[in-house]
Amino acid sequence: MSPRTLRLVAIAAVVLIAAAPFLLQPFTITLMNYIGVFALIALGLVLLTGIGGMVSFGQTAFMGIAAYSTAWVSAIMGYSPWAGLVLAIVLSGAVAAALGAITLKLQGHFLSISTVAWGIAIYFTFGNIEGLGRNSGIASIPPISVGTVALVDSNQIYYLIWAMLIGAMWLAHNMLDSRVGRAMRALRGGNSMVESLGVDAFRIRLATFVIAAILAGLSGWLYTHLGRFISPVEFDVTRGIEYLMMAMVGGAGYLAGAVVGSGLITLLKNAVQDYLPLIAPGSAGQLEIVVYSAIFILFLQRARNGIVPYIAALLPDVVHERPAEAEPLPRRTQPAPGKVLLEVEAAQKRFGGLAAVNNVSFEVMSGEILGLIGPNGAGKSTMFNLVTGAMPLSAGKVTFDGRDITRARQRKIAEAGVARTFQHVKLRPNMTLLDNVLLGTYARTKAGFFSGALGLDAAEEKRARYEAMRQLERVGLGDKPFELAGNLPLGNQRVLEIARALAADPVLLVLDEPAAGLRKQEKAALSALLKSLREEHLTILLVEHDMEFVMGLVDRIVVMEFGTKLCEGDPASVRADARVQEAYLGGVV
Amino acid sequence: MTADIAAILAVDGIATGAIYVLIALGFVLIFAVTRVIFVPFGDIAAFTALTVAALELKQVPGTVGLVAALAVLATLVEVVSLLRARSPGRIPKALVFYLVLPLAAAGAVWLTAGHALPMALRIVLSLVLILPVAPLLDRIVYRPIADASVLLLLTVSMALHFALVGLGLLFFGPEGVRTETLTDATFEFGSVFVPGQTVMIVGAALLFSALLYLFFEFTLTGKALHATAINRTGARLMGIRPERAGTIAYLLGSLLAGVSGILIAPVNTIFYDSGFLIGLKAFVGAIIGGLVSFPVTALGSVLVGLLESFASFQSSAYKEVIVFSILIPVLLWRSYTTVHSEEDTEE
């Protein structure tokens, strides 16, 4: 399927949705209204859960905050629901920002538990505020008016709901395909990977959280003026898990999952309400929640990724256009060859009583390839983490390009021009090769959430895509830029990591065991690639096990053993050093 | 607030806290062994209370139907998985464990339910009946996804909790119950009267904490559970079956939840859905213990009880808001003091 056909399909879908009130019965339109409203909150959950990896059970709290805001403004204070919308968005966004600032440092299930906590706390607050009708809620909420037309009829508000949903989907789609959107999609790869690309992971998480809350708020606003009555019960944690279920059943990793899930669950609910009384008269109400929960559990057991991927597998692949040639992104000026680029002075790292790195000093000169070698447990990887800022030093000093980076955050070190790869490859397996490499350009580009969502970043995006494509070609992976990274063999995944690092236009490239798991030809190709990078005056620090690989490649070697530096020098002299031989081969008897 | 009121609130808080201790210990136990945050714990406590109440009224408790339904379902799941694994030889044993034993418990209660029973027997019957619930849920719900991330297991737990609330309404009806007091004795400490019930609650909490400690420190099964908690793969290599360890953990957890349900039933009116809040408050205690430490969990749970007691005196309407808001700073503190492995994030 070409992008053009895809656009036609999208237009056809929009036309069908617009024509629905003329074709369908009023009851069906009412159902569609609720599907649209729930799809908005589910869309937020898709961004938060499926894309960002943060599971929230408390999303209804934001829906409730928005609902109560607009109900208060319109039903109690007598202003327009549009004024209610402003308050709803501002308040749900602000509360999310405050809650997020406190809780988003939490990881994994701790974060999710906190969402239950504030979800319940906010829910109980609604029921206790005198001015908001306590547990009986707020009734006779006015409808939304557009001009002089009050949207009372379900056919009328239908257009508002679906216009908002389609708008939100379009913005979300653009955003995910932009610089920050890619960072969002990378969040699940873990903090150390994301930060190593110069991304402020916390900021991206917070923004995702606020966006999801605002979508929930929008949903709450529409919900309030659709049903015209609200009470706290509609915003408790039970409902929260229902919306999460919509997102996950639909497919939490896909924007379309929100609509598919919301549609499916809403229709299912409707069917259950119709048919359960026939099967189990008298206890239908109780069984309803049992049925949903059982379905949800089955889905989580058998089809965690939801329905959308199954549908997508049946559809023809979308044909992507290779990035066109564009003006290259601005480059750093590489330092003159032969001066000290990285200086490690008396670095120490202690874990309790164990000194993993003890008083190690060495220098990396610009333009050279330095190999850091040593037997298992010598402290190479720890040294690596100290240099890249993944771990703080216990004592000592690290200077990069004249700047003291001893206490600098990983992200700042990345911004300064140090790009790294990982011993255990950290790629985003569900993103394409091109998108993975594009992640590397993050620190060199500027587009934010708004310009990404509104598509104002086109020029910069074009340059970044061209740059990523160039790096893919440079490392020899240019033939299939739209393949998913997870489909590559391990050797190529390592090379892809190098392409990602190169896309950051680094001054210093730090590679953690790049030859591990590679076959002989792959090693030769990697060696050739690294040599060609040296020709371009790129400086490389290499932590490696494979002696043959190191000896034929590097200019100088630093040998570590038991956390200390054993010796340093050119490959030949290191090879001849008796201490090195003893460390590797055991004492000569 | 006078000193007398403070003392009364403190006694009340310690009693509530002691109940949370029992449930929280169960949380820690099950999380440690299976990585499941077993949200439905509170529901099991509430169901036990409802069971005792039904026996008091000489009615057949809804738990009988619930256990029977779960037993049939678990048996089906187990038999199908055994057939798929091509080991039909293990079916008879599975039938005994998943079908016969739970049904025997349900049958015993069903047969005796109409008679006037002494209190001790009612309690024992309720406990016997509630014991299979958690292991059966484990077999049906968690075992097929035992290797999933903690986050996915937590999502499943939330869904399971809502399923149980629905089943609770179905099997027990919407009426709240309060059972006979276990003892009418009161003790006087200075100017403060302490009901015998409170003493029993605290005593039971201490007793079970001690038993749990002894079990983990001095029995081979306890050590096996501990080993599974620390490293599943390692334990498996040592010949410990994580599934079995999980079942034992769920059995113990059921027992703890059951005991807490029996202790709370005479003090609070329990509805089919009361379990969630009780469970979540106990969970706050478990989080204070980082879901690992039994002693800190016990202390944390008592703290939550005290907090709740004093909060309800200051502002009863916002009691829940206050108790749950405290969870966030606790989580933050815990998150900073726990080392996270990046490998736990799931694709």
Image: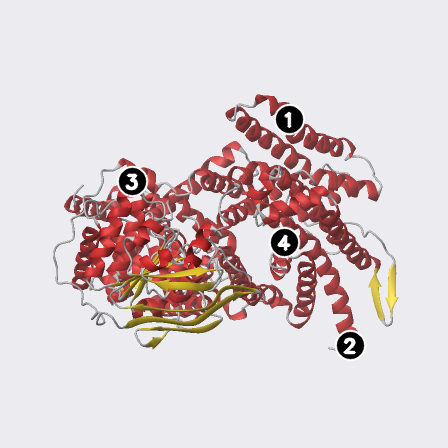
Q: Position of residue B243 (x, y in %)?
A: 60, 38
The residue under the point 57% across, 26% down is B79
**Looking at the image, is mark 1 or mark 4 earlier in the sequence?**
1
Tell me which numbered mark, 2 or 1, is placed earlier along the sequence. Answer: 2
Residue that appears at 12% across and 63% down: A327
* Label 2 and label 1 in one chain: yes
Crowd class of label 4 (few under 14; some 14 to 19; many from 20; radius 10 Å): many
Query: Identity of the amino acid at label 4?
Result: Gly
CB contact under 8 Å: marks 2 and 1? no
Q: What's the CA distance linking mark 1 and mark 4?
A: 31 Å
Q: Amino acid at mark 3?
A: Ala
- Residue mark closest to the camera, 2 vs 1: 1
Q: Amino acid at mark 1?
A: Leu
Element carrying mark 4: helix
Q: Which mark is residue A312?
A: 3
The residue where tag 2 is placed is B3
From the viewer's perspective, tell me whether residue A31 is left or right of residue A159.
right
Residue A173 location, quadrant: bottom left
Which label's residue is closer to the chain start, 4 or 2? 2
Q: Is residue A419 above or below residue A37?
A: below
A226 sits to left or right of B165: left
Mark 2 and mark 3, same subunit? Answer: no
Asked if residue A478 can be seen in this view, the reply is yes
Task: Give the residue at mark 4.
Answer: B279
Q: Residue furthest top?
A: B89
Q: From what the image shows, is residue B223 above or below residue A175?
A: above
Q: Is residue A239 left or right of residue A450?
A: right
Q: Nearer the viewer, residue A232 or A29?
A: A232
Task: Give the labeled residue for mark 1.
Answer: B95
Report, in whole angstroms, how far the alpha carbon at label 4 lies from the one at label 2.
30 Å
| Residue type highlighted by circle 2 | Ala
